[in-house]
Amino acid sequence: MEISDKPAKKTFKVPSSYTILSILIIGLAILTWLIPAGEYQVNDAGQFIAGTYHTVTSNPQSLFDILMSPMYGFVGNERTNGAVEVALFILVIGGFLGVVNKTGALNAGIASAIKNNKGREKRLIFILMILFGLGGSTYGMAEETIAFFPLLIPIMIGMGFDKLVAVAVILVGTQVGALASTVNPFATGVASDVAGISIGDGFVIRVIFLVVLLTISMIWVYRYAARVEQDPTQSVVYDQYQQDQENFKLPEEEIIFTKKQKQVLWIFILTFAVMIVSLIPWSDFNITIFTAINDVLTHLPYAGPLFNHLAALGTWYFLEITMLFMASSLLIAWVYGLSEDDLISSFMVGASNMIGVALICGFSRGIQVIMNDGQITATILHWGEMGLKGLSQQLYILLTYIFYLPMSFLMPGTSSLATATIGLLGPLGEFVGVPAHLVITAFQAASGALNIITPTSGVIMGALAIAKVDITTWWRFVGKLFLLLVVLSAVMLVIASFFV
């Protein structure tokens, strides 16, 4: 047999987020030698005041500045806030999820929901998509879902549906939840920190997004499942019908949902409920109940000193919710009876899974460091201010959404994309009357929609590998829903711009 001396043909591989961010940092450092430096006057909230731009002495960034920018991205300097609080929170919430996973409460809870809905199979689609949607919206549930695909695929096939229904329930559920992230720390949290606003800003709009888009997605998946149940030939993967019946058999071992696991699941739910309540700026709505509760606790006879320095719910930020998840991890370990070794090891495993996300926060913040230290941020914003004159709020938010669609493909990580772009697009929006929280909603909507179809997502490719489905088949299956979500998101953003 003849052996070819020709080297193997290299295929194009999308660069990692770190490579893309490094290129951006270097490119922007070069621009500090070319773009005039400038400044804006700022108001009490730290926002640039339109029409106050003026030039200043240039401060070109050197090779040393390039190398130092990710370091300052973490700890901050005189011109840029660091990302250390965000990174710490991400590591702690990773540890919290590691402790929860150690108990098996999430897996057992989903399995219990499936078991309790035998004979009401199609209703299960709504129940599970709501659960996965809430997971995506509140804490960016993604990689954690991989364990559910081997469990759900045999069940959906056994119910008379197909494996795409199972994949859609999980993938579409979580990604539509992420699309309408309410307090997702990896999207809403990071972006809000970059923009210098509360995570709770824009909460009501994002809840509306979640309800509308998740409802439409559930109906879409339900209607497909009903067609397949009535006529299996309607399945997009009908050619694999016999093979799937053999490959995906129901597990023989029944997962038991123990009393302790139920208690852990309630703590899990309560923790996220407290986080949501703590981040909503209640004072903006003239709601003072949480401040009143705080005053009562701190003035209790004898017990009052235990609550000294307690911040009222509605005024919390990253350090306070980091404390919440750390305390909940300890509470779960105590309730479930985990040993000290199990607690520490599971927490460390969970935190280690988030190291990449935590690092990207500081690394990507280096973009702001270079721009701010080179004093070209204000100049670029000034050019944008001049170019946006006469542009309506509606057109700006629509163009922002369109911009984020391809960017979400190039940088599928929400944390890196938010840190790299919100610092510029947020202030630009303010010039035309679009608040930063609506820009963040546009970013999330585009990112969440793209992450339903992008082959750069490890979760999608892993899920499809488990289901033995190629990416083109998945596109054929979910393509119409994707387009519907994109169009509806754009329409809802335009409508929201009239009320902000």
Image: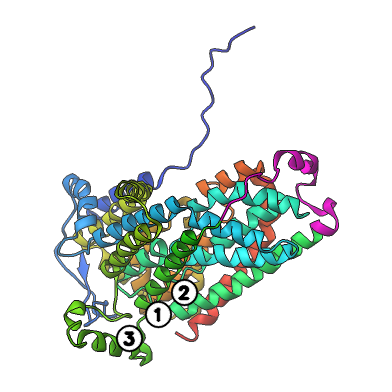
Q: Residue at x 49, y 38 (%)?
A: 13
Q: Is residue 126 above or below residue 450?
A: below
Q: Considering the numbered disc 1 on the image, is that residue within a helix, a strand or a loop?
A: loop
Residue 432 disc label: 1
Mark 3 vs mark 1: in front: 3
The label number, if any, that marks residue 290 in the structure image: 3
Is 295 positioned to the left or the right of 115 in the image? left
- Is residue 234 within the magenta segment? yes
Q: Residue 167, how many percent across, how many down?
A: 64, 53
Q: Distance between the residues labelled 3 and 1?
A: 35 Å
Residue 451 visible in the current orientation: no
* Residue depicted at 35% across the width and 82% down the height: 281
Point out the image quarter for the C terminus. Answer: bottom left
Give the residues in magenta: 228-256
Left or right: 70, with 329 as reference point: left
Residue with the mark numbered 2 = 396
Q: Which amino acid does the dot numbered 3 rest on?
A: Phe
Secondary structure at badge 3 equals: helix
Return the disc, 2 or 3, that comes first in the chain's sequence: 3
Disc on the earlier residue, 1 or 2: 2
Q: Residue at x 56, y 45 (%)?
A: 461
Q: Which residue is drawn at 43% across and 54% down?
A: 413
* CB contact under 8 Å: marks 1 and 2: yes
Query: Where is residue 62 shown, x and y percent of the image?
Result: 17, 48
Towards the viewer: 303 or 397 = 303
Q: In this view, does 139 lie to the left or right of 362?
A: right
Toward which corner of the image does residue 369 lie, by quadrant? bottom left
Three-letter amino acid code of the residue under disc 2: Tyr
